């Protein structure tokens, strides 16, 4: 069995299309995404900032940087998780997001927790 590491953050993603906030005729496609950040390491870690790269179906890229997530900078204890939901707008029915969270371990060491690419897609937009 591998030895537990000081920092081990797992990021899980889920996205959904928001038809009630979208207007395809105006090239406005709204999506919500839910992020769960799990601390499987042996030290608490605080989320300090976020960096998102959002790409629409035409290849247009938006970069978003900011402090915390939805106004919070949560401290995530070993074995615990933090979940939040946010959203974004695209000009196309399909796109993707990826990025990272700036974190700081309880011993003061900073690190980045990557978020793998995940898809934003209106239902039936992909065959």
Image (tube, rainbow, N blue to C red):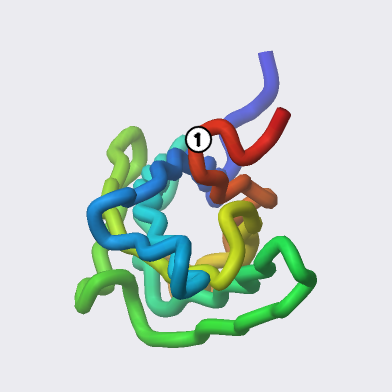
Q: Is residue 122 visible?
A: yes
Horizontal and vertical percent position of residue 24: 46, 61
Residue drawn at (60%, 63%) of the image? 92
SS at badge 1: loop
Mark 1, residue position: 123
Q: Residue furthest top?
A: 1
Side of 77 where 9 appears, left or right: right
Q: Residue furthest right?
A: 59
Above or below 24: residue 119: above
Residue drawn at (50%, 85%) of the image? 65
Q: Nearer the viewer, residue 9 or 71?
A: 71
Horizontal and vertical percent position of residue 102: 51, 73
* Quadrant occupied by the C terminus: top right
Badge 1 local density, few (<14 within 10 Å), some, or many (20+)?
few
Residue drawn at (52%, 83%) of the image? 64
Above or below 86: residue 54: below
Horizontal and vertical percent position of residue 93: 57, 55
Horizontal and vertical percent position of residue 46: 35, 66
Q: Nearer the viewer, residue 19 or 103?
A: 19
Side of 109 where 66 appears, left or right: left
Q: Which image quadrant for residue 14?
A: top left
Q: Is residue 104 visible?
A: no
Q: Which image quadrant for residue 105?
A: bottom left
Above or below 96: residue 59: below
Residue drawn at (40%, 56%) of the image? 31
Q: Nearer the viewer, residue 35 or 16?
A: 16
Above or below 105: residue 121: above
* Quadrant occupied by the N terminus: top right
Q: Nearer the viewer, residue 105 or 59?
A: 59
């Amino acid at each position: 069995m591998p030895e537990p590491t000081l920092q081990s953050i797992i990021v899980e993603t889920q996205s959904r299309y928001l038809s009630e906030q979208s207007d395809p005729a105006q090239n406005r496609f709204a999506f919500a995404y839910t992020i769960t950040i799990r601390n499987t390491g042996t030290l608490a870690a605080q989320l300090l900032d976020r960096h998102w790269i959002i790409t629409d179906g035409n290849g247009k890229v938006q970069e978003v940087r900011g402090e915390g997530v939805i106004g919070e900078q949560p401290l995530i204890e070993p074995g615990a998780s933090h979940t939040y939901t946010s959203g974004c707008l695209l000009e196309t029915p399909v796109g993707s997001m990826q990025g990272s969270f700036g974190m700081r371990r309880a011993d003061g060491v900073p690190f980045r927790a990557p978020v793998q690419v995940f898809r934003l897609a209106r239902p039936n937009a992909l065959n």
